[in-house]
């Protein structure tokens, strides 16, 4: 087991990602944030909170999207996925959407997320932000626009992102 | 997490966790049904046949819509005008349909136990859409789901099931479902329409006084008088029934509280339920219909997933 990011590094990384978002989206009038259920919502929640601290008085639309019903492995999966809450109470029509997830691995979750998101409207553009990019393991041509940390890991290894609010501490670990 | 059963034949076979899993899943499907595009591709490689050996409007439409909203391919079979009228057996009919590579069967039959019989002979998941006077599980699930939506929980609530208890599969499934979720149930109606075994076998209260039952309950689920199932009349006239057991505005206004009114449909207006009650703010009848699609989507999704796991 190896620590990739400790709590301090995670805070700095999330701050950096937020500054990169501000650089491209300024006041977020036309931008919305969407975190992917179940694990991406912790990162998206942190990013939303940090952006509001960095841009006091700004309103940023923020929703959560579950992709369970859009997965491409329904009849192949060994276990049935129980859906999580989706809450997008604003229009994404002609908005700049930033999709947020904790780990980008094969790209299949993001493909499903794009399908799911398009059922809510037709955005002007879509960007992808991930805390961890496991490059060299992609099965679809999907790349992040904002990356916290890029890692090279064997397929047998697992990346786990721990969050204070769920796991009691902030840490990203690589498990053999 | 998945259902403990392969088929949805009745609420009697389900555990409380199964019902809660169906509700949890239906919550998310209800959200899907509020979206601009109300359809998901989840069951795009699944073919479902709706085999209806008995007339139905809302249940068949509700199942068909649920299947389409899940992206499944659907086939509809009605016994009238089919080979059944030429003497074909139930198993032959269904096996012929399954040879066309169908993945799930939704079945309604006038004979109690018909889907249980079929489940012993075919391998695909079966959803009981009502069998005789036995069970109508998805109706009970959507009823309990609607109570939970309106009151926040089913546990501890008092529910009166009113009317023709003897001939109602909705009543039996509702009793199983509500009891498993921790509700108190009273069945109320004429003595001729309430089986004697009810209180002892099913753990419900029995009342023959509609006013007392309504004064006791939080929710009244009013059932249709099923004249088509009565070979010999069990009460003297519809007018007498309406006077003694009909739920009307005057009766509700005489209570010291506002209760919720439910009805599985179709309503015999002016018999078991008056229009001034059925169309009032106390009635959640149309919410029940709306919730039916989400609950049936959940049941189909979970059963299809169960099949995939095997």
Image (tube, coloured by chain):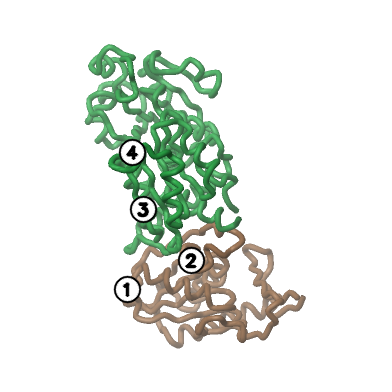
Chain colours: A brown, B green
Q: Mark 2 or mark 1: which comes first in sequence? A: 2
In the image, taking residue B115 as reference, residue B249 lies left or right, namely: left
Using the image, tell me which numbered label, if any, was put on residue B86.
4
Q: Mark 4 or mark 3: which comes first in sequence? A: 3
> Regarding mark 3 in the picture, which secondary structure is present there?
strand
C-beta proximity under 8 Å, tags 2 and 3: no
The answer to which image quadrant residue B213 occupies is top left
> Regarding mark 1 in the picture, which secondary structure is present there?
loop
Image height check: is B304 above or below A148?
A: above
Judge depth for marks 4 and 2 and give the one in front.
Answer: 4
Distance between mark 1 and mark 4 Cα atoms:
56 Å
Image height check: is B58 above or below B1?
A: above
Residue B261 is situated, as x and y percent measured from the top left of the image, at: 34, 32
Judge depth for marks 2 and 1 and give the one in front.
Answer: 2
Distance between mark 2 and mark 1 Cα atoms:
19 Å
Distance between mark 2 and mark 3 Cα atoms:
27 Å
Residue at point 40%, 36% (across, down): B109
Residue A43 is situated, as x and y percent measured from the top left of the image, at: 56, 72
Q: Within 10 angstroms of label 2, few (less than 14), some, or many (20 or more) residues?
A: many
C-beta proximity under 8 Å, tags 4 and 3: no
In the image, taking residue B78 as reference, residue B21 lies left or right, namely: right
Judge depth for marks 4 and 3 and give the one in front.
Answer: 4
C-beta proximity under 8 Å, tags 4 and 2: no
Distance between mark 4 and mark 3 Cα atoms:
21 Å
Q: Are marks 1 and 4 on the same chain?
A: no
Using the image, tell me which numbered label, if any, was put on residue B75.
3
Of the pair B265 and B229, the residue shown nearer to us = B229
Q: Are marks 2 and 3 on the same chain?
A: no
Q: Please state, as top left, top right, bottom left or bottom right, where the C terminus of chain B lies in the image.
A: bottom right
In the rendered structure, the residue with mark 4 lies on which chain? Answer: B
Residue B202 is situated, as x and y percent measured from the top left of the image, at: 53, 24
């Amino acid at each position: 087991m190896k620590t990739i990011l400790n709590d301090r590094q995670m805070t700095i990384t999330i701050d950096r990602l937020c500054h990169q978002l501000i650089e491209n989206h300024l006041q977020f009038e036309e931008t919305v944030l969407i975190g992917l259920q179940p694990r991406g919502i912790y990162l998206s929640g942190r990013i939303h909170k940090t952006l509001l601290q960095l841009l006091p008085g700004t309103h940023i639309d923020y929703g959560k999207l579950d992709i369970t019903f859009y997965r491409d492995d329904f009849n192949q999966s060994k276990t049935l996925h129980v859906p999580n809450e989706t809450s997008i109470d604003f229009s994404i029509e002609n908005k700049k959407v930033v999709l947020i997830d904790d780990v980008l691995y094969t790209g299949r979750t993001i493909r499903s997320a794009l399908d799911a998101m398009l059922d809510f409207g037709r955005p002007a553009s879509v960007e992808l932000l991930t805390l961890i990019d496991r490059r060299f393991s992609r099965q679809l041509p999907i790349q992040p626009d904002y990356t916290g940390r890029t890692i090279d890991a064997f397929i047998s290894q697992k990346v786990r992102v721990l969050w204070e609010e769920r796991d009691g501490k902030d840490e990203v670990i690589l498990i053999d | 997490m998945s259902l403990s059963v392969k088929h949805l034949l009745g609420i009697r076979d389900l555990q409380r966790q199964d019902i809660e899993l169906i509700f949890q899943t239906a919550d998310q499907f209800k959200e899907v049904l509020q979206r601009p595009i109300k359809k998901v591709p989840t069951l795009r490689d699944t073919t479902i046949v709706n085999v209806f050996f008995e007339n139905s409007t809302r249940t068949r439409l509700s199942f068909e819509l649920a299947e389409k909203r899940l992206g499944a391919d659907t086939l509809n079979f009605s016994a009238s005008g089919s080979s059944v009228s030429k003497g074909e057996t139930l198993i032959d009919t269904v096996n012929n349909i399954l040879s066309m590579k169908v993945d799930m069967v939704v079945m309604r039959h006038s004979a109690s136990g018909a889907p249980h019989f079929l489940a012993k002979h075919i391998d695909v998941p079966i959803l009981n859409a009502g069998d005789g006077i036995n069970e109508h599980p998805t109706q009970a699930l959507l009823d309990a789901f609607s109570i939970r939506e309106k009151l926040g929980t089913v546990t501890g609530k008092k529910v009166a099931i009113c009317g023709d208890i003897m001939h109602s599969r909705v009543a039996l499934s509702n009793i199983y479902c509500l009891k498993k979720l921790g509700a108190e149930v009273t069945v109320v109606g004429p003595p001729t329409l309430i089986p004697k075994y009810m209180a002892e076998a099913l753990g419900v209260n029995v009342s023959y006084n509609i006013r007392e039952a309504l004064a006791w309950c939080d929710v009244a689920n009013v059932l249709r008088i099923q004249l088509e199932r009565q070979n010999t009349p069990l009460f003297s006239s519809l007018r007498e029934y309406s006077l003694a057991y009909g739920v009307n505005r005057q009766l509700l206004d005489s209570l010291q509280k506002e209760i919720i009114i439910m009805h599985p449909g179709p309503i015999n207006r002016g018999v078991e339920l008056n229009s001034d009650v059925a169309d009032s703010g106390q009635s959640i009848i149309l919410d029940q219909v709306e919730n039916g699609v989400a609950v049936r989507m959940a049941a189909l999704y979970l059963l299809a997933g169960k099949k995939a796991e095997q």
